[in-house]
Image (spheres, rainbow, N blue to C red):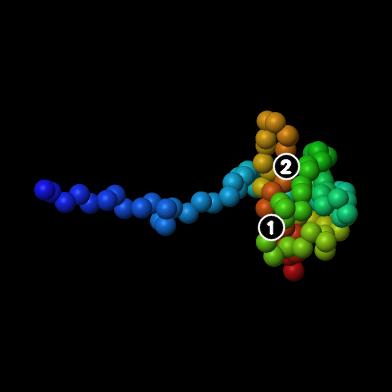
Amino acid sequence: MASRRAAPSLQGSMKIRPFEPRGARAVGQIAKLLIGQGYGFVRLRDNREIYFHRADVREGTSFNELSVGDSVVFELFEDRVSGPRAVQLQRARRSR
C-alpha cells in the first residue's frame, strides 16, 4: 500500500489583506471638516471638492489635528458607484 502525502495547508501561508483602494496622486487643501461626523472635503485646483473619511487618513496623521486650509496630498480614487474619494490622505510637507 503506497503512502499518501497530504497536500500542504495554505491557511498559514496565505495572508489576507484588507481592500486598499489605489488612485492617482493628487494635492489639494482641506475645504470642510466635520470632526463630529468623521469626514471632510478636499478642494482640488479645479475647485472640485473630494470627500474623505477619517478612515482614509494615512497612518501617522491625526484626523482631529487637520484644519481647514491645510495643504494635503492623497490618492484620488475614482469609484463609479460612490464617486471620487481621497484616500491615504496626509498633510503636505512644507518646503523650507
Name the residue carrying label 2: 85
Q: Residues within 10 Å of mark 2 (few under 14, many from 20)?
A: many
Q: CA distance from mark 1 to mark 2?
A: 14 Å
Question: Which quarter shows the C terminus?
Answer: bottom right
Measured as percent of width and height from the top left, residue 88 is found at 67, 53
SS at badge 2: strand
Give the residue displayed 78% in from the left and 43% down from the top: 51
Task: Check disc 1: other Cα within 10 Å, few if <14, some if 14-19, many if 20+.
Answer: some
Q: Work out which residue is located at the far bottom of the displayed protein and give it.
A: 96
User: Which quarter of the picture shows residue 90?
Assistant: bottom right
Viewed as shown, does residue 90 lie left or right of 70?
left
Q: Is residue 70 visible?
A: yes
Q: Which mark is residue 58?
A: 1
Answer with mark 1 or mark 2, whichever residue precedes in sequence.
1
Quadrant of res 60 = bottom right
Q: Secondary structure at mark 1?
A: loop
User: Is residue 33 toward the left or the right of residue 5 in the image?
Assistant: right
